[in-house]
């Protein structure tokens, strides 16, 4: 690297000082908001009038001293309103739409929990920055539970009502077809589709024992839904399925190319592949315009990329982007690749392609 002679811009330095302080405050608040979600504090305050810390704590069945300190952090972070005369707190309606379980897919405290999940591996990650390699899934014991909570909101609101119409497969699924979900995690996609389309058969594949165990238990009452422990990079299920789906499950694979070839082979001729992957460009300069890009690259470094590298994989990263994804799909043999989206999942691209 060479030294630059760019003149020092004092205003820029001043603006960056404010930004740094904002990052520190917001980073700290993100942990408190995650606690607000886990303890049910936001839900408990929703729609309620002004209340003292003792009243808030009693309603949420929590310890008053902790709740009071949390309320102070939320007040100073302009999340909760404070009336100093009466020493009461209130969650404004304009904020609760992004903070409570009632808000469904709009509840940002659910993805917020990823920050504390990633913080757990910070020290290990410093190690792989030095040595290379990656951190395997078992370094993230809370991952499947959190992923399942995040996916649940969009699967429940979007899968049957928005994704199926997008695929134009309502009639086929009603008549009865074979469907696979690769990298199914806790298996909710197959479970919801299995309930909605009892004449079709659904199989979820994942290499996570936790995911498959949880999925199998949840779908125990459904004859048309099953789950198998399998490495997506070594699937050998030739022409067994009419529809294969992957939801956020290609970019963090160790061997994404093998997974895509395996999926191509799994499909019967004319079969459909729905590949859902984070909405991003393969070009950094295009992602700079995305307000969620810093979050995406952080998740990538601290989870998606590192789990792939842990198994000697490609380490594509969360933001591998639609250009590279299209290239990978084409190389695997897919044709007529369309990139679509759905209303309740703004963060993902829906690649729909056919096996010729
Ligand atoms: C980001 S999660 C998505 C889970 C689920 N599709 C969802 O949307 O909730 C990625 C999933 O891919 C699985 N996975 C990663 N590599 C895999 C492999 N080689 N074989 C099978 N599953 C794999 C992980 O265990 C994890 O459940």
Image: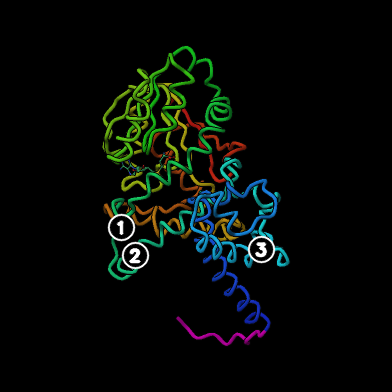
Range shown magenta: 1-10
Q: Main secondary structure of the magenta part?
A: loop
Horizontal side of 184 relative to 160 (left or right) equals left
Q: Disc 3 designates what residue? A: 78
Using a 10 Å C-alpha cutoff, classify the residue at mark 2 as few (fewer than 14 neighbours), some (14 to 19) or many (20 or more). Answer: many
Foreground pick, 240 / 27: 27
Q: Secondary structure at mark 1?
A: loop
Residue plotted at (67% across, 64% down): 87
For marks 2 and 3 on the same chain, the one whose residue lies earlier in the sequence: 3
Q: Secondary structure at mark 3?
A: loop
Give the position of the C terminus as an image quadrant.
top left
Residue 54 vs 12, above or below: the answer is above
Q: Mark 2 near mark 1, Cβ–Cβ under 8 Å?
A: yes
| Residue 36 visible in the snapshot | yes
17 inside magenta stretch: no
Residue 124 vs 1, above or below: the answer is above
3 inside magenta stretch: yes
Residue farthest to the top, as pictured: 175
Using a 10 Å C-alpha cutoff, classify the residue at mark 3 as few (fewer than 14 neighbours), some (14 to 19) or many (20 or more). Answer: few
Q: Disc 2 designates what residue? A: 125
* Quarter location, residue 329: top left
Residue 99 vs 221, above or below: the answer is below
Where on the image, by quarter, is ligand 1? top left
For marks 2 and 1 on the same chain, the one whose residue lies earlier in the sequence: 2
């Amino acid at each position: 690297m060479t030294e630059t002679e760019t003149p020092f811009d004092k205003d820029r330095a001043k603006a960056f000082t404010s930004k740094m302080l904002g990052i520190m405050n917001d980073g700290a608040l993100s942990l408190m908001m995650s606690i607000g979600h886990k303890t049910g504090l936001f839900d408990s305050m929703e729609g309620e009038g002004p209340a003292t810390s003792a009243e808030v704590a009693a309603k949420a069945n929590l310890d008053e001293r902790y709740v009071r300190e949390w309320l102070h952090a939320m007040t100073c972070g302009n999340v909760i309103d404070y009336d100093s005369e009466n020493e009461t707190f209130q969650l404004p309606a304009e904020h609760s739409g992004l903070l409570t379980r009632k808000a469904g897919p709009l509840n940002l405290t659910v993805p917020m929990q990823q920050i504390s999940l990633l913080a757990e591996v910070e020290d290990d990650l410093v190690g792989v920055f030095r040595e290379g390699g990656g951190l395997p899934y078992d370094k993230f014991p809370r991952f499947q539970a959190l992923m399942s909570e995040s996916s649940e909101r969009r699967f429940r609101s979007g899968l049957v009502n928005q994704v199926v119409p997008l695929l134009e497969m309502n009639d086929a699924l009603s008549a009865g077809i074979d469907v696979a979900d690769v990298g199914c995690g806790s298996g909710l996609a197959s479970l919801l589709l299995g309930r909605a389309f009892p004449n079709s058969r659904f199989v979820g594949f994942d290499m996570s024992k936790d995911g498959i165990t949880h999925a199998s238990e949840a779908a125990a009452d459904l004859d048309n839904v099953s789950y198998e422990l399998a490495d997506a990079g070594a699937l050998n299920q030739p022409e067994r399925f009419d529809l294969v789906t992957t939801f956020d499950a290609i970019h963090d694979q160790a061997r994404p190319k093998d997974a895509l070839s395996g999926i191509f082979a799994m499909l019967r001729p004319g079969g459909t592949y729905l590949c859902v992957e984070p909405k991003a460009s393969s070009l950094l300069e295009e992602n700079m315009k995305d307000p969620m890009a810093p979050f995406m690259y952080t998740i990538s470094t601290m989870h998606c990329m590192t789990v792939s590298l842990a198994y000697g994989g490609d380490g594509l990263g969360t933001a591998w982007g639609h250009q590279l994804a299209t290239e990978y799909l084409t190389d695997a043999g897919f044709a007529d690749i369309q990139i679509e989206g759905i209303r309740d999942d703004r963060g993902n691209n829906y690649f729909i392609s056919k096996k010729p």
